[in-house]
Image (cartoon, rainbow, N blue to C red):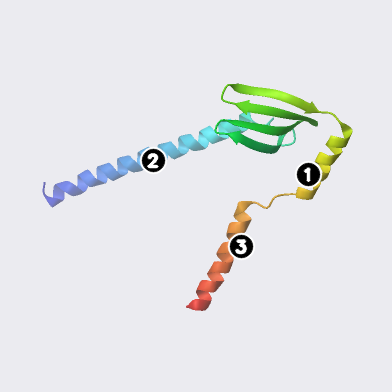
Amino acid sequence: MSSPELFPSLLKIVSALAVTVGIMIVVAYLFKKIVKRGSEIDNDDLIKILSAKYLGPKSSMMLVDVLGNIMVIGISSSGISMLTEIVDPESLERLRTIQGQEGKQVPFSDYLKRLLKSDGSKLKAQS
């Protein structure tokens, strides 16, 4: 194949790839919009996982708050089952104080931004 014949073929391949990737991006964007519209009812205040303890490779226990009801559920490879519901006022109060002490967790992105800022200043100082 000579050089003049190679360029049109390369141009066709690159343009076909660009069209294919463009179509994939548009489909992903539309799919995201459709899924988001379907989950408008989903609210973080309705169901909260308060704590999770992994007991083995495919088993764990979770403390879940569903509309103000605190439940302990067990999850294993064979299924999910409710172990108990916490209704004791003393236990509920203890749980609320523990939750209040934890407060809001700082997102990982904040730690990363802080780390990058500090590293960037160190790099500038060294050069």
> In the image shown, does 71 or 113 lie closer to the viewer?
71
Query: Counting residues from the N terminus, which is met first, the one under dot 3 or under dot 2?
Result: 2
Residue at 31%, 40% (x, y): give it: 16
Few, some or many residues within 10 Å of mark 1 (<14, 14–19, 20+) = few
Query: In what element is the residue under mark 1?
Result: helix
Total numbered badges shown on the rendered structure: 3
- Whole-Å distance between the Cαs marked 1 and 3? 26 Å
Residue type at numbered disc 1: Gln
Q: Quadrant of residue 81?
A: top right
> In the image shown, does 7 or 34 lie closer to the viewer?
34
Image location (x, y in percent) of residue 100:
80, 47
Q: Quadrant of residue 55?
A: top right
Instruction: Using residue 39 as the reference point, say whether residue 97 is left or right of it.
Output: right
Query: In what element is the residue under mark 2?
Result: helix
Q: Quadrant of residue 45?
A: top right
Mark 2, residue position: 21
* Above or below: residue 20 compared with residue 84: below
- Whole-Å distance between the Cαs marked 1 and 2? 46 Å
Instruction: Using residue 100 as the reference point, say whether residue 22 is left or right of it.
Output: left
Q: Nearer the viewer, mark 1 or mark 2?
A: 1
Query: Counting residues from the N terminus, which is met first, the one under dot 1 or under dot 3?
Result: 1
Mark 1, residue position: 99
Image location (x, y in percent) of residue 8:
21, 46
Query: In what element is the residue under mark 3?
Result: helix
- Whole-Å distance between the Cαs marked 3 and 2? 35 Å
Residue type at numbered disc 2: Val
Instruction: Using residue 125 as the reference point, say whether residue 15 is left or right of it.
Output: left
Residue at 73%, 29% (x, y): give it: 72
Tag of residue 114: 3
Image location (x, y in percent) of residue 86:
80, 29
* Above or below: residue 109 compared with residue 26: below
Does residue 47 appear anywhere in the picture? no
